[in-house]
Image (cartoon, rainbow, N blue to C red):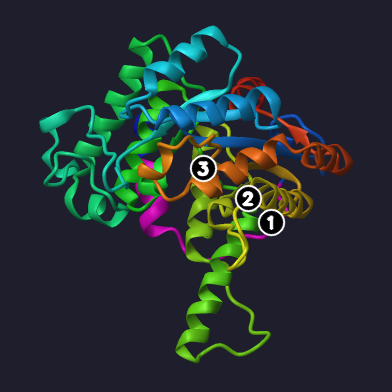
Amino acid sequence: MRMTFLTRLLAVVWWTSPLVAPAQTDPTYAEKLGWQKGDRVVILHIDDAGMSYDSNQGVIQALEKGVANSVSVMMPCPWVPGFVKYLRQHPGVDAGLHLTLTSEWQDYRWGPLVGTAAPGLVDDEGALWPGVSQVVQHATPDEVEAEIRAQLHRARRMGFEPTHLDSHMGTLFASPAFLERYVKVGSENGIPVMFPGGHDALLIRQLQADAIAKRQREGSYQEGQTLPVPAEIIRGRELGKALWQAGLPVLDDLHNTSYGWALPKGVTPTDENLRKMKTGKYIEAMRSLRPGVTMVIMHCTAPTEVFPHISNSGDSRKGDLLAMLDPALRQCIREEGLILTTWRELKERRNRAQK
């Protein structure tokens, strides 16, 4: 009964909800989960475990020696067995599924777990499409759902019960039909899904900055102009309410900009320069958080000489790792009074909370 209600409600919310921004006077999801009014609760989350040996080593260092406290695993990737072995040895780690529908690197690629049963998911190399728009163009919702279920099945067969689901490269948020299947599988299995359905202050800021930049390029922006709350945010708040009613926890906000942080042109990417830049950016982000539950996404990797042959993102990923290990970031979290949490704790609190 719960799935029938949720699937029907999802369709109504996404396609027909009026685009009127609701007043943000409701309690935050942090308050609904039992924290105090004004509390700033944070998940410091690492994407891309299982992608490579270097990825696994970076994740482990950030979890064991740094302040990061959550991770998600890319089940179609080659180094998943190594990381799942680590999870079995460390059952307290908060680990979810980084549901993977793209394979974005040029020479290091992976295919769907459903194989040829889903031809719309693969390119001419037999790998998942490199870009999100290509998945939306070619794949059907049924194929997407089949792959989500296959990734969950592989995890469980390996003895890995995920604490949450999220989406590699945001592919599952690129289509209302894909989003519906993502939420459907999570709700059906009682697994929290990453979804920011609260005040979304950081997301609004990011979307409005993008809109301003676009208008500036077009010559249609006036300085000081007030922009409306983006339609995606308004619909997202309604979906957040539906997820809560389905018994799943909901995020108040999502920080997903760290992958784009880069050193200024001409600055050599030494460890010290990367650490200083990334730590400073994370400290700035921590200080800007509003009350509620916020998930902060990063990619921690310990690159070996092999990693440049996989991806050109090694400097950014190493910078994330160095920031998580930096005592200055840990000190900032203490000074700001931030409360660190995990998806496991969110689900436990949701189970105890009132509808």
**Disc sitting over residue 195 in the figure:** 3
Q: Earlier in the sequence, mark 1 or mark 3?
A: 1
Residue bearing mark 1: 24
Residue bearing mark 2: 270
Residue 168 image offset from top left, x and y in percent = 40, 42
Q: Using a 10 Å C-alpha cutoff, classify the residue at mark 2 as few (fewer than 14 neighbours), some (14 to 19) or many (20 or more).
A: few
Q: Which residues are magenta?
A: 8-26
Query: Helix or strand or loop: what does disc 1 sit on?
Result: loop
- On the rendered image, what quadrant is the N terminus found in? top left
Q: Is residue 19 visible?
A: no
The residue type indicated by label 3 comes to: Phe
Residue 332 image offset from top left, x and y in percent = 83, 43
- State the separation of the CA atoms marked 2 and 1: 43 Å
- State the separation of the CA atoms marked 2 and 3: 35 Å
Residue occupying image coordinates x 71% and y 32%: 67
Residue 282 image offset from top left, x and y in percent = 70, 49
Q: Nearer the viewer, residue 24 or 54?
A: 54
